[in-house]
Structure formats: structure tokens, C-alpha cells
Image (spheres, grey):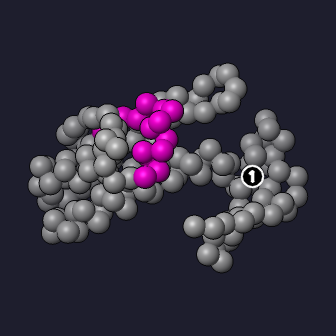
Amino acid sequence: MEANMKWIKNMQFECNNRDLKSRIDASLEHGGEAQYPSPKELLLNAMMGCAGIDVLLTLKKMRQQIEQFQIEIEAEQTVDFPIHFKTAKLIFDCFGPLDQAKLLRAVEGSMTKYCGINFMISQSCHITYQINLNGSFMYEGVALYKV
């Protein structure tokens, strides 16, 4: 993989991945204009995106019909430098006629085996996850990756 970034103005940068452009910015308290996501916000997006792709691919292979799917993340940062995520909780909200055992297998697979982003982050951050199915709590677990 390769990427590059160039400074635009103030604390804004343009990133280039495979000729796909995106921007990042610092928060107001860090001298930015908060017009684009910060690097840490993008990291949270990457954590959700990696898990989401895993789960949807697995459910598709299991021939499960998902009607709605969203992930929320709640993260707590340390106060001392280097400031990093101390804890993170991914909340999977799934809707549709899904088999609970298959949904659990899909999410657990991502959160304990397949998602490389969450694996890397889990080396310095305690990651938990919750699965809700059709508006009701289903399961809660810890992202423990076996290498």
C-alpha cells in the first residue's frame, strides 16, 4: 500500500490513496478549522469500516439477509502524551431476519480474527463490542485477537 499527503493551508491536508482524494483537518483547539475529520476521527472510521466490511462479507457468504446495518463507536482517550485511545466500544445495530448464531459468528470473526485495523489498535486500546439485533441487545464481547 502507498499513500501521500500534501499540506493545503493552516492544519488542512489533502490525502491521496489510489488517486482517491480526501482531506483531514485539526480540531479548533489544535489550531485547525475542524472542516474535515481529524486523524483520530478517521481512525475511528477505519475501525468501523474494517469491521463493517468483514461482517457484511461474512453474512453474505452465510446467505443472511440484512436489511439495515450501522456501527457506532464510543472511544475514550488518555490524558497524557502520547494521547491515544484507551478504550473503544463498537456497537453493531443489525436489522433483518438474521440467524443469531450466524450474526454472532460474523461479528466475532471480525473482532477476534479478521479485522487488521482493530487488531493493530487493540495492541494499545481495550476494544469491546456489542451486537443489537432488531432493536434488542443480543451480545457483548471483547476484541481478543489470536496471532
Query: In this orientation, which residue lies closer to the viewer: 3 or 76?
Result: 3
The magenta segment is: 116-130
Q: Position of residue 111 (x, y in %)?
A: 33, 45
Residue under the point 51% across and 54% down? 46
Q: Position of residue 78 (x, y in %)?
A: 60, 25
Q: Is residue 104 above or below residue 30?
A: below
Q: According to the image, label 1 marks what residue?
A: 25
Q: Position of residue 15 (x, y in %)?
A: 71, 64
Farthest residue to the front: give it.
Answer: 147
Residue 61 lies in quadrant: bottom left
Residue under the point 25% across and 46% down? 108
Magenta stretch containing residue 120, yes or no? Answer: yes
Residue type pointed to by label 1 = Asp
* Residue 8 placement, left or right of 138: right
Query: In this orientation, which residue lies closer to the viewer: 87 or 132?
Result: 87
Query: In this orientation, which residue lies closer to the viewer: 83 or 70?
Result: 83
